[in-house]
Image (cartoon, rainbow, N blue to C red):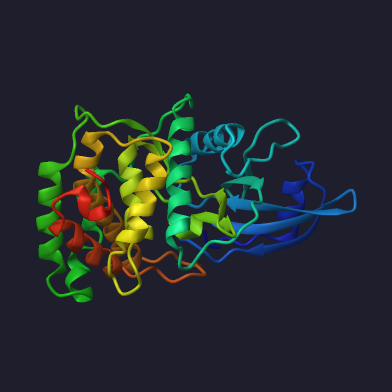
């Protein structure tokens, strides 16, 4: 989450006139992430303060995808998952418009995102992710993954000519890995369970109160894809330390948590190394793009792409899922 577009007092007052959430007490920009303009909105209704998240969707979000995202959050919350709930306007709809951009107001979830999650948090996330995958099987909408393997070469073109200025030999390594991934990536006929995945479950998108998972947010990359690919994304995001070392204790806890709710199939286990390498490539390329073409007005700096270069090298050497803590 980040802030690119400011709202005037008049725009805010006009927006909130369409909702029944009380009078504004404060509106503060949230300086996290890289995609949308997000604000912590505090209102007062019946002498009690209430908190919401106001999201203004920037140009990188396709407005046609918003019904999918909004309805998915509603479905998951109604299924018992700790997800934000979109607030309905007085006319029953969930989307508004300000400054030519779509806007939604969603419920505020209590909890903290952890800078250094422990194994117990990885276990809780694994279990909640499996619950999310199962609940989403009853969701009636689909959305193609617009950042799947087929999109990576075109994404890479935006930063290819600059890659070696960031790290010598990076272009050659990416070229080689893209070819390897294309050769070994599971196709649509592979016996891998598919469904709705979050696709962006980084630590700043998961909240905890103590050791209890209290919220999963930011569903704006959610899509239809291989469910184990979601697990591979989290493996990359949660199980590597700041010194780039792989923490197999966290990885084993993540896998155990997931398997406690939804058991991975043998085919999914076999595919984990290539899926994990693909997840590392996806975030290496998007970070490269943002590094060389940062969004104007962002309150946060682009994240270092080289964090995912180290992960990609690790996965390239991995021979089986046992090295991720999975019992074969």
Across and down, in percent, residue 181 comes to 15, 48
Residue ID at (39%, 66%): 294
Whether 164 is drawn above or below 40: the answer is: below
Left or right, 210 with respect to 191, comes to: right
Q: Who is closer to the viewer here, 107 or 258?
A: 258
Q: Quadrant of residue 186?
A: top left
**Residue 83 in sight in this render:** yes
Whether 164 is drawn above or below 67: the answer is: below
Q: Quadrant of residue 37?
A: bottom right
Q: Residue lying furthest front in this view?
A: 327
Residue ID at (76%, 41%): 19
Q: Who is closer to the viewer here, 22 or 227?
A: 227
**Residue 154 in sight in this render:** no
Across and down, in percent, residue 80 comes to 59, 36
Q: How many marks?
A: 0
Across and down, in percent, residue 73 comes to 55, 38
Q: Who is closer to the viewer here, 165 or 169?
A: 169
Left or right, 95 with respect to 156, comes to: right
Q: Quadrant of residue 292?
A: bottom left
Left or right, 128 with respect to 23, comes to: left
Q: Quadrant of the C terminus?
A: top left
Residue ID at (72%, 37%): 89
């Amino acid at each position: 989450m980040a802030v690119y577009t400011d709202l005037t007092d008049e725009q805010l007052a006009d927006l909130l006139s369409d909702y029944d959430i009380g009078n504004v007490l404060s509106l503060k920009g949230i300086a996290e992430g890289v995609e949308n303009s997000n604000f912590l909105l505090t209102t007062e209704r019946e002498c009690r303060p209430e908190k919401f998240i106001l999201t203004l969707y920037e140009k990188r979000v396709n407005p046609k995808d918003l019904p999918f995202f909004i309805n998915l959050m509603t479905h998951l919350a109604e299924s018992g998952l700790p997800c934000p709930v979109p607030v309905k306007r007085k006319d029953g709809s969930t989307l508004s418009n300000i400054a030519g951009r779509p806007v939604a107001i969603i419920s505020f979830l209590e909890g903290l995102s952890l800078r250094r999650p422990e194994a117990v948090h990885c276990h809780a996330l694994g279990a909640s992710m499996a619950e999310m995958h199962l609940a989403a099987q009853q969701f009636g909408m689909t959305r193609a993954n617009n950042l799947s393997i087929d999109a990576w070469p075109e994404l890479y073109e935006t930063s290819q000519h600059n890659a070696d200025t960031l790290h010598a030999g990076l272009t050659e390594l990416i070229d080689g890995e893209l070819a390897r991934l294309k050769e070994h990536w599971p196709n649509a006929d592979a016996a891998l369970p598919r469904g709705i995945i979050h696709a962006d479950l980084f630590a700043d998108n998961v909240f905890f109160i103590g050791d209890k998972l209290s919220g999963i947010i930011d569903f704006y990359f959610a899509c239809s894809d291989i469910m184990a690919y979601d697990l591979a994304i989290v493996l990359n995001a949660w199980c590597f330390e700041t010194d780039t070392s792989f923490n197999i204790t966290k990885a084993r806890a993540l896998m155990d948590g997931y398997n406690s709710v939804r058991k991975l199939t043998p085919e999914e286990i076999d595919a984990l190394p290539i899926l994990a390498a693909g997840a590392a490539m996806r975030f290496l390329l998007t970070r490269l793009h943002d590094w060389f073409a940062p969004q104007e007005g962002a309150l946060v700096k682009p994240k270092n792409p080289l964090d995912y270069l180290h992960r990609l090298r690790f996965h390239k050497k991995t021979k089986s899922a046992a090295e991720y803590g999975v019992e074969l």
